[in-house]
Amino acid sequence: MGEKMVRLSVTIPEVLLDFLDEKVIKKGYSSRSEFIRDLIRETVIEDKWKSSEGEVVGVLTVIYDHHQRELTQKMIDIQHSRYINIMCTTHVHLDHHNCLETIIIKGSPSEIENIAVKIAGLKGVKFAKLTRTAKVEI
């Protein structure tokens, strides 16, 4: 059985309501409530990352030149350099020169951010972005 739901009434200016409704439609939410619950969950995840306590999950997306000498080995060495949990990696060839890799990492926020910064700074990495997420209990 699901969680007990509680009705909440909020008073906002009409211009904000119009903005909210536009976002709900554009993002494909079934209701305003679903959209607002997701906003709250995002804040919970942000707080987990800021607190530096507990375990979180990061998805590091990297695009790099696979012809760059020793780059892939350096990326692997960085991933093995600390005790963090590399849960999964995905490697895709975009074209003759470029590869896209996703690295799903579980650990403390500081450990994950450290790995992301080190990989992003390697010669031959053209793009790197860390998406921060975490298990949400609510």
Image (tube, rainbow, N blue to C red):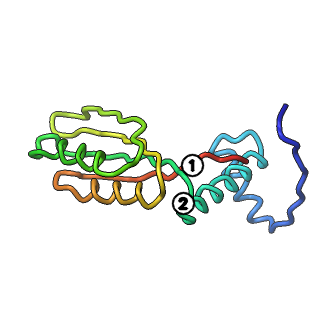
Q: Is residue 138 left or right of residue 101?
A: right
Q: Across the whole image, how many numbered discs are drawn on residues?
A: 2
The amino acid sitting under disc 2 is Trp
Residue 99 percent across, percent down from the top left: 24, 38
Residue at 16% over, 34% down: 96
Q: From the image, tell me which residue sits under label 2.
A: 49
Q: From the image, tell me which residue sits under label 1.
A: 134
Residue 30 percent across, percent down from the top left: 74, 39
Instruction: Quote the CA–CA distance across marks 2 and 1.
Output: 8 Å
Residue 51 percent across, percent down from the top left: 57, 65
**Nearer the observer, 78 or 124:** 78
Say what secondary structure mark 2 lies in: helix
**Nearer the observer, 10 or 137:** 137
Q: Is residue 33 left or right of residue 48?
A: right
The amino acid sitting under disc 1 is Ala
Residue at 55% over, 65% down: 50
Q: Is residue 93 left or right of residue 4?
A: left
Residue 121 percent across, percent down from the top left: 24, 59
Height in image: 92 above or below 74?
A: above
Query: What quarter of the picture does the N terminus occupy?
Result: top right
In the current view of this chain or complex, which residue is farthest to the left? 69
Q: Are marks 2 and 1 in contact (CB under 8 Å)?
A: yes
**Nearer the observer, 44 or 22:** 44
Q: Is residue 54 left or right of residue 99?
A: right
**Nearer the observer, 19 or 4:** 4
Residue at 42% over, 37% down: 87
Height in image: 110 above or below 136?
A: below
Say what secondary structure mark 1 lies in: loop
